[in-house]
Image (spheres, helix red, strand yellow):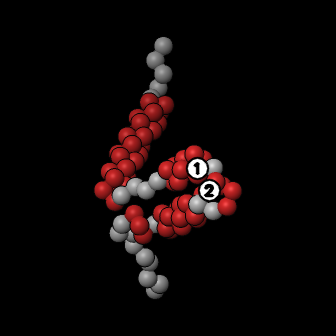
């Protein structure tokens, strides 16, 4: 049986790892050539790339999970409401 990898931390997500690589690439491009000569644009791009520390990321994940639960509850409530007979 093949061993399935478990997600223990958000850094384990492939999407997170790829996003970090992309962030680094964008940051490096903003420091090179003509792009780097436009100081305002280069600084804006580097600032937009940003960095989210682990505690902030964990809060964001917890918030996203909470929103997911709320939406799931709303979907269930709508489904139950649709199943009820309509009264005139």
The residue under the point 34% across, 60% down is 54
The residue under the point 58% across, 60% down is 31
- Whole-percent x and y of residue 44? 54, 47
Q: Where on the picture, by quarter, is residue 53?
A: bottom left
- Whole-percent x and y of residue 70? 37, 40
Q: Depth check: 22 or 2 in front?
A: 22
The reply to whether the C-beta atoms of the residues labelled 2 and 1 are less than 8 Å apart is yes
Residue 22 visible, this orientation: no
Q: Which residue lies under the disc numbered 1?
A: 39
In the image: residue 39, left or right of residue 79: right
Marker disc for residue 67:
none
Q: Helix, strand or loop at disc 2?
A: helix
Against 36, is 88 above or below? above
Q: Depth check: 1 or 82 in front?
A: 1
- Whole-percent x and y of residue 49? 51, 54
Q: Helix, strand or loop at disc 1?
A: helix
Q: Residue furthest top?
A: 88
Q: Depth check: 85 or 35 in front?
A: 35
Q: Which residue lies under the disc numbered 2?
A: 36
The residue under the point 53% across, 54% down is 46
In the image: residue 64, left or right of residue 86: left
Residue 78 visible, this orientation: yes
Q: Where on the picture, by quarter, is residue 36?
A: bottom right
Q: Depth check: 66 or 11 in front?
A: 11
Against 59, is 74 above or below? above
The residue under the point 63% across, 49% down is 38
Against 1, is 76 above or below? above
Alpha carbon distance from label 2 to label 1: 6 Å
């Amino acid at each position: 049986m093949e061993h399935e990898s478990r997600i223990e931390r958000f850094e384990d997500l492939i999407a997170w790892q790829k996003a970090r690589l992309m962030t680094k690439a964008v940051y490096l491009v903003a420091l090179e050539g003509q792009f780097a000569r436009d100081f305002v644009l280069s600084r804006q791009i580097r600032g937009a790339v940003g960095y989210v520390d682990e505690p902030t990321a964990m809060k964001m994940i917890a918030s996203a999970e909470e929103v997911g639960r709320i939406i799931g509850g709303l979907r269930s409530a709508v489904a139950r409401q649709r199943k009820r007979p309509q009264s005139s």
